Every structure is written in structure tokens, then in C-alpha cells.
Image: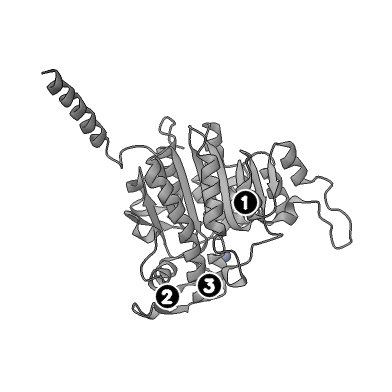
């Protein structure tokens, strides 16, 4: 009898755990991947040239996001990113501020207030619109020095990307120092280990690490960017941030997919997306082991009006065409994996993606 009751107790626990179901559990961690300018054709082109071996297109939940901004059917990265980072539409070129320039609280700020750790990994300058909407509040996206300054206020414990020149004192065309303030010094005073290449970033033992690994944007893949950069930077960020038992929010951007669309280059598109996918694979492995991590992969907008005219699955080739060199108004894909992933199915507004992430991460709080 004693053994039987032990068995039934054990069974009860197993049944309770399985009734909780993987999708009904709430995530503690969120890793958000943004493929800047990544539309459906971009993803399918990358799937084709990879022989359908990619990680994120195989995620169990897929959906679509409507991307229009407050003042334009076709958004830019500033307004599209602000919608994902804050849950509100704003005008193109504005960074996590309403059209009237009042401040919108970002997902990373909510995370910090809840005791979670935060991180940013990108291939553009850290002051570019997509990383900026998570870390800064400025009315105009091109105010790179003000955006750099926001990092010194602790917007992210771990961050890595380009834009070093905006963190260091600059000189204007007349040769005078633009600003006596040096953001690198501020970061060091705030306890950051400031590193200038991937190896030092990865080797750092600090819990606060800044990686300023290029003067402006990093090289594109075809210009020789280290094909391990994004995956290794993502792995290091996860390693540091996951020390926090309260969890973390990490945003990783495939920044230069957008450049590929602007350049109407199919090979650039597929190379940049496959690079992003290597970073997603690192995150998926962590999430599979960890069990409390939600991964969302989406885009801020589509770039280039890309379509695929023909292709060859055996030869892993695509013949693509582009409509123009700007951002289009089409919906962009959403891929989700982990606890809460089901919330991201169907067609949603980009602002609703924020609200889904917010409700899942902060279940005790009221809807923002
Ligand atoms: Zn663009």
C-alpha cells in the first residue's frame, strides 16, 4: 500500500506538470529577433538556398504582423521598432516617443523595473533605429549622440554592435570637439567593461559588458563580417543575462537584411538572413534546455518589395525581383517558439506583438 500511494503521488505530480502544458506556462526570459526589412519572400529565398535547413522557419507557431506607422502606410525602422518595443504607433523617424514627443516606456525598461536583465545585440550601429527604440527616447532617429548617451544610463547590461564613434568624443567638420562628454567614460564609471572586439567581449568576466566593435555599422556579410559574430555575441549575451534568476529580455537584430533589400540584392538578402538564423539556432538550443524562454522572430517592415519569380529546390537557387528600393507596406512574418508562443499566431498589429510579450512576461501587471 505504501508503495502504491507513493506511485500515485508520483503520478499526480506528473499529471499536474503535463496539465500545465508547455504553452500555458509563462516564459521568464524573452529573446526577440528582429530581421530589419525581412519579408516573406526574403525568408523563403533563404529557405531555398539553405536547402530548407533553417531554424526559425521551422518554429511551431507562425503569424503575420501589420506594420503601418501613425503617419505612414509604410513604416521606417524607428516607428516600426517603437511599435514592437512599446506597443504604440508613432510617426516615422521617432524613437520610443509619441507623435507629441512624450516618452513611451520600452520593453527593456519594463523588464528592468521587474528585476530582469536586458541586452542588445546588433550588426548596425548601436545608435541605429532598431536598437535605439529599446534603449533611448529621442524625437529624431538621427540624433545618434543622444542615443549613445542613453546606454550610459544602464538601458542594457550587455550590448554589442557598431557605432563606436558616437560613444567617443567627436570633432565636427571645423575640427572642434562636439561634446566634452565621453560616453565610454560614463559607461566605465557605471561599471561596464568596455570592449572593442568580439574576442574581448566574449572573454569578459563582467556582468556589464559594452561591445563597440565597429566605428559605424559593421561590415555586411559580403564585406567580410565574421560569420560567427552574431551567433557568438548572442551566446555570450545569453550566458551573462541568464545568471539572473528573475530572467532577462534580449533583443537581437539582423540589421543589414534591410540594406540588402535597399540594394535589391538577393544574395545579400539570403546571406544576412542565414546569419540571423545562426543566432536563432543558438537561442533555440538555450530555450530548449531552459524551458522558460520564449523566442519571437519578426521584422519591423519589408524592404524592396521582393518577390520570387522562379527557383530550383535541387540547385538551391532563386530568381527574385524587387519592386523598388524602399520600404513596402506588406505584412511581415512572425515566428514563435517556447512557452506562450501560441499568442503570436494569426494576423496581428505590430503593437499587439508587444502586448503579447508584455502579458506573458509580466502576468501580474495590468495590460499596458
Ligand atoms: Zn530601411
In this rendering, the label closer to the viewer, 2 or 3: 3
Tell me which numbered mark, 2 or 3, is placed earlier along the sequence: 3
Name which quarter of the figure residue 155 lies in. top right
**Residue 8 in the image, given as x and y percentages of width and height:** 15, 25
Graded by Cα atoms within 10 Å as few (under 14), some (14 to 19) or many (20 or more), the crowding at tag 1 reads: many
Disc 2: which residue: 307
**Residue 197 in the image, given as x and y percentages of width and height:** 67, 55
Q: Nearer the viewer, residue 357 or 92?
A: 357
- Where is 8 relative to 77, above or below? above
**Residue 134 in the image, given as x and y percentages of width and height:** 57, 47
- Label of residue 268 in the image: 3
Q: Residue at x 59, y 64 (%)?
A: 226
- Judged from this view, the residue extending furthest toward the left is 1
Can residue 95 be seen here? The reply is no
Q: Residue at x 45, y 40 (%)?
A: 29
Graded by Cα atoms within 10 Å as few (under 14), some (14 to 19) or many (20 or more), the crowding at tag 2 reads: some
Amino acid at each position: 500500500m505504501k508503495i502504491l500511494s507513493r506511485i500515485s503521488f508520483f503520478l499526480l505530480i506528473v499529471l499536474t506538470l503535463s496539465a500545465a502544458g508547455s504553452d500555458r506556462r509563462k516564459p521568464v526570459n524573452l529573446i526577440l529577433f528582429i530581421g530589419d526589412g525581412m519579408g516573406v519572400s526574403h525568408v523563403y529565398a533563404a529557405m531555398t538556398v539553405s536547402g530548407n535547413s533553417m531554424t526559425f522557419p521551422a518554429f511551431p507557431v507562425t503569424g503575420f504582423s501589420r506594420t503601418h506607422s501613425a503617419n505612414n502606410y509604410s513604416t521606417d525602422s524607428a516607428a516600426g521598432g517603437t511599435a514592437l518595443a512599446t506597443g504604440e504607433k508613432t510617426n516615422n523617424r521617432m524613437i520610443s516617443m509619441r507623435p507629441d514627443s512624450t516618452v513611451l516606456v520600452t520593453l527593456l525598461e519594463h523588464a528592468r523595473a521587474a528585476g530582469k536583465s536586458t541586452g542588445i545585440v546588433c550588426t548596425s550601429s548601436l545608435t541605429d533605429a532598431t536598437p535605439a527604440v529599446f534603449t533611448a527616447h529621442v524625437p529624431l532617429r538621427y540624433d545618434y549622440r543622444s542615443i549613445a548617451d542613453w546606454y550610459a544610463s544602464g538601458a542594457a547590461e550587455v550590448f554589442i554592435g557598431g557605432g563606436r564613434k558616437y560613444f567617443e568624443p567627436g570633432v565636427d567638420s571645423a575640427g572642434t570637439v562636439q561634446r566634452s562628454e565621453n560616453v565610454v567614460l560614463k559607461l566605465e564609471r557605471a561599471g561596464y567593461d568596455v570592449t572593442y572586439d568580439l574576442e574581448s567581449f566574449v572573454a569578459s568576466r563582467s556582468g556589464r559588458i559594452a561591445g563597440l566593435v565597429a566605428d559605424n555599422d559593421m561590415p555586411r556579410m559580403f564585406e567580410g563580417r565574421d560569420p560567427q559574430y552574431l551567433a557568438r555575441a548572442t551566446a555570450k549575451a545569453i550566458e551573462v543575462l541568464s545568471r539572473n534568476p528573475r530572467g532577462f529580455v534580449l533583443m537581437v537584430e539582423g540589421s543589414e537584411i534591410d540594406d540588402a533589400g535597399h540594394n535589391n540584392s538577393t544574395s545579400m538578402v539570403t546571406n544576412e538572413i542565414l546569419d540571423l538564423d545562426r543566432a536563432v539556432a543558438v537561442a533555440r538550443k538555450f530555450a530548449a534546455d531552459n524551458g522558460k524562454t520564449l523566442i519571437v522572430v519578426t521584422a519591423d517592415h519589408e524592404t524592396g518589395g521582393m518577390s520570387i519569380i522562379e527557383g530550383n529546390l535541387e540547385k538551391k537557387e532563386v530568381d527574385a525581383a524587387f519592386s523598388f528600393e524602399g520600404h513596402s507596406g506588406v505584412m511581415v512574418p512572425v515566428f514563435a517558439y517556447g512557452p506562450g508562443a501560441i499568442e503570436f499566431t494569426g494576423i496581428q498589429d505590430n503593437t499587439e506583438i508587444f502586448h503579447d510579450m508584455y502579458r506573458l512576461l509580466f502576468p501580474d501587471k495590468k495590460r499596458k
